[in-house]
Amino acid sequence: MKTIIVFLVFLFMAAPAIAWQGYNIDNGTTIFVNVEKGQEDIKTGNVTYFDYDTGEEKIGYLNMYENNLGLLMDLNTGDLIRVQMEGRN
């Protein structure tokens, strides 16, 4: 029983991010933004994201506007990606 409790505690601590799905407006590919636990209401800030256009996880700066539209800047290349993210309640 003690082992199960320790495992469950470790499992919850090991899942620090929540994926927020959206897409690249310019080419229509899917993007998953990892939002750190406790920052679920993020509108602006540094994020990691998976870009299905390149198949890579990247670091970016997200700036969201009205209607779930925003800009995601790739911090390595400086490229700007226009995104539309799914609505979140």
Image (spheres, rainbow, N blue to C red):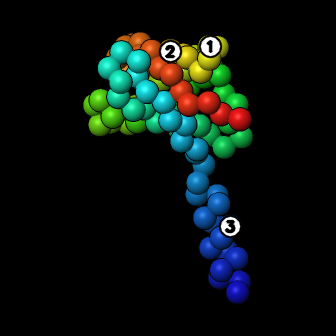
Q: Residue furthest left?
A: 54
> Where does the image place residue 9, in percent across and percent down from the top left?
68, 67
Q: Give the distance between the C-alpha atoms of the residues marked 3 and 1, in whole angstroms.
A: 36 Å
Is 44 on the left-hand or right-hand side of 31? right
Q: Residue furthest bottom?
A: 1
> Where does the image place residue 7, in percent across and percent down from the top left?
62, 73
Tag 2 and tag 1, C-beta contact below 8 Å = yes
In the picture of the structure, the residue carrying the numbered disc 2 is: 71
Q: What SS does tag 1 mark?
A: loop
Numbered circle sitting on residue 89? none
For badge 2, the amino acid type reads Leu
Image quarter hosting the C terminus: top right
- Camera-side residue of 22 and 63: 22
- Camera-side residue of 48 and 89: 89
For badge 3, the amino acid type reads Val
In the picture of the structure, the residue carrying the numbered disc 3 is: 9
Q: Give the distance between the C-alpha atoms of the residues marked 2 and 1, in whole angstroms.
A: 8 Å
In the picture of the structure, the residue carrying the numbered disc 1 is: 65
Q: Identify which residue is drawn at 53% across, 27% down.
A: 85
Binning the other alpha carbons within 10 Å of mark 1 as few (below 14), some (14 to 19) or many (20 upward) gives: few
Tag 3 and tag 2, C-beta contact below 8 Å = no
For badge 1, the amino acid type reads Tyr
Considering only order in the chain, which callout, 1 or 3, is on the residue closer to the N terminus? 3
> Where does the image place residue 55, in percent across and percent down from the top left?
29, 37
Image quadrant where residue 64 sits: top right
Tag nearer the camera, 3 or 1: 1
